[in-house]
Amino acid sequence: MIRILIVDDHPLMREGLRALVASVPEIEVVADAGDGDAARREAQLTQPDVVVMDLHMPGVNGVDATRAILRTVPSTRVLVLTMFEDDDSVFAAMRAGASGYLVKGAQQDEILRAIRSVAAGQAIFGPSVARRIIDFFAGGAAHGPAADPFPELTDREREVLDLIASGRSNSAIARDLVISAKTVSNHITAIFAKLQVADRAEAIVRARQAGLGTRRP
């Protein structure tokens, strides 16, 4: 019997995974949690074989929760199941100790196969994630930032982020791009949501780590 803990801040996602697992006799859901802190507590209480972990959640995120769980329950394996497949998310999860990484939208058979594989001590990654890892270790990430960092952003949002990281104010960005201040504000709101950052300072740090922000203010 493979005992799993489901961690996701969306109740429908947790229920969907419960329903999927209910059809498989050798997999049992021992608990679920809606955030990283609750996940850590449930993992200590239930000692699951596998934690199916979302990454971006309110409060303690999935990366920090993964690190904490593996520190206190080292026999547990973590399978990330998230909607994000950008390099930052993938490699942060790997550094935290995740044994597998799937993107939401994966086929049900793929999810069940991943749970079984991770429980057996194997590492498993979805096709698009595996390609990113291969490219990274082939040297694609060793020569500086990717040509298009933050693929989840639109071209305009990336341009706004670049200007933010360069130290531009909203009004200066509006002048540079010949758009309204309100439009700039809307773009910034979308950027913060997509990058899962809390404020401008955190966005600047992420952007500069990716090589943005080289323009002079």
Image (cartoon, rainbow, N blue to C red):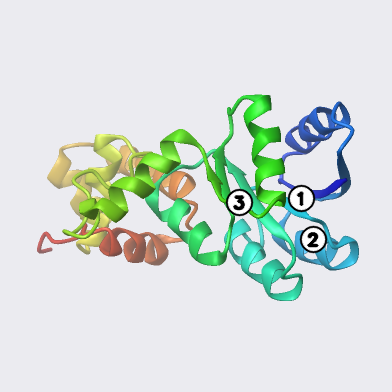
Name the residue that disc number 1 marks. 34
Name the residue that disc number 3 marks. 122
User: Which numbered circle lies on residue 2?
Assistant: none
Question: Could you say where residue 128 lies in the image, as x and y percent from the top left?
Answer: 42, 35
- Give, as a three-letter code, the residue at label 3: Gln
Q: 63 left or right of 19?
A: left
SS for callout 2: helix
Q: Please state which of the two labelled residues, at mark 3 or mark 2, is closer to the viewer.
A: 3
Neighbour tally class for label 1: few under 14, some 14-19, many 20 plus, Cα within 10 Å = some
Name the residue that disc number 2 marks. 38
> Of all residues shown, which one is farthest toward the left?
216
Question: Could you say where residue 88 lies in the image, as x and y percent from the top left?
Answer: 41, 55
The Cα–Cα distance between marks 1 and 3, rounded to whole angstroms, is 26 Å
* Picture residue at 15% right of the left edge, 45% below the top: 175
**Quadrant in the picture for the N terminus:** top right
- Give, as a three-letter code, the residue at label 1: Gly
SS for callout 3: loop
* Picture residue at 14% right of the left edge, 61% below the top: 214
Question: Could you say where residue 101 lies in the image, as x and y percent from the top left?
Answer: 55, 46
**Quadrant in the picture for the C terminus:** bottom left
> Of all residues shown, which one is farthest toward the bottom?
71
